[in-house]
Amino acid sequence: MSQNTSGIPRNIAMTSIPSLAFLNGQFLPMAEARISVLDRGFLFADGIYEVVAVVRGVLVDCPGHLARLQRSLREIRITPPISLDELPTLMRELIAREQLDEGLVYLQCTRGAHPQRAFHFPDPAQTTPTFVMFAQRGQLLHNPLAETGVKVITLPDIRWRRRDIKSTALLASVLGKQAATEAGAFEAWMVEDGYVTEGTSSTACIITADDVLITRPLSQDVLDSITRRAVFRLAREAGLPVSQRAFTPQEAYAAREAFTASATALIMPIVDIDGHRIGDGTPGPRTRWLRQRYLQLACSENPEIAEPS
Ligand SMILES: Cc1ncc(COP(=O)(O)O)c(C=O)c1O
């Protein structure tokens, strides 16, 4: 795994610190973008977020990510302070201002700051939600980890029960990713009632010995991953059957291939799960093809890679 200057392994090589933030309608130098201590995002993780990959300056699968952002906002009853229709234009402006060729755009919206810290929703007339965006450079296309493949560990899933909402309440995922990092792994797959739910920040997929791609069906147990939708479209193109069902860690150990799917790691081959070698211990041909095809479509400036929901 690549190392940063402090020697801590990191998953994706983020090569720059964002210089700008878009905060409630304004582009500001990062150092001047201030949010109140009373912001409910800070106090209660009362907010949601999105991450959209940027490849060759193009937003990948942006409509899917923005539709999910809208859904997350609706589910937790936040009315954003800006029109979501303006977002693609603002995101492109951010990319241009940051001269970003490859990396990600991060978006977050919280219920805002109210003078009184109280659990229930504040009066919306007195509280403006906070909307933030920034862009971060990162190596997506030529991620060296995709060449070697990555390790995954499994852990109990200790998260809340509405994982379909892309909530900023990510402590369980933070702890899971840290456990993976300390174990020299890229990701932790979380296990509930004996079955894998998903990764801390990715969808879990395996390809069985008889060539079926398996991933868990959508429910409140997992996030409706936009990359997962793209995987389905690509699998159809490749003639690879897909079965949406839960699978056990034991099935994963015996898989022919395995991979994680997410906006920033894209389709990332897995070569080891809990110390069990997957396939021959190198990225499998089907996973390689899926990754290459996904990138090919992303680079051809086709923003509509994923299946419509
Ligand atoms: C828990 C979880 N599952 C799956 C994903 C993958 O979603 P997407 O492909 O939309 O990035 C993420 C991404 O952050 C995630 O946090």
Image: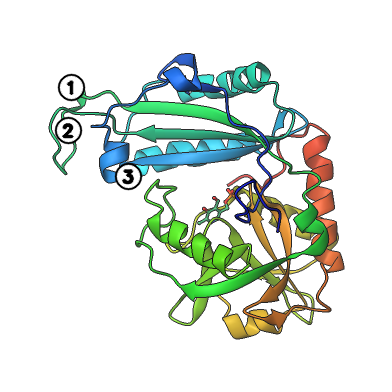
The kind of residue on which mark 3 rests is: Ala
Of residues 198 and 106, which is closer to you in this image?
Answer: 106
On the image, which quarter does residue 48 sit in? top left
The kind of residue on which mark 1 rests is: Gln
Asked if 177 appears above or below 277 in the picture, the reply is above
**Residue at the spot x=40%, y=27% of the render?**
131
- Determine which residue is flagged by label 2: 122
**Residue at the spot x=33%, y=29% of the render?**
79
Image coordinates for residue 150, horizontal then vertical, percent: 71, 65
The kind of residue on which mark 2 rests is: Pro
Local packing at callout 1 (Cα closer than 10 Å; few below 14, some 14-19, many 20+) is few
Number of the front mark, 3 or 2: 3
Image coordinates for residue 266, horizontal then vertical, percent: 70, 50
Local packing at callout 2 (Cα closer than 10 Å; few below 14, some 14-19, many 20+) is some
Asked if 121 appears above or below 2 in the picture, the reply is above
- Determine which residue is flagged by label 1: 126
Q: Are marks 2 and 1 in contact (CB under 8 Å)?
A: yes
Image coordinates for residue 239, horizontal then vertical, percent: 83, 64
Q: Could you tell whether 305 is left or right of 202 in the image?
A: right
Q: Could you tell whether 50 is left or right of 103 in the image?
A: left
| For marks 3 and 2 on the same chain, the one whose residue lies earlier in the sequence | 3
- Marks 1 and 3 sit apart, C-alpha to C-alpha, by 19 Å
Asked if 262 appears above or below 150 in the picture, the reply is above
Q: Could you tell whether 140 is left or right of 183 in the image?
A: right
**Residue at the spot x=76%, y=57% of the render?**
145
- Determine which residue is flagged by label 3: 45
Q: Quadrant of the N terminus?
A: bottom right
Residue 105 is marked as: none
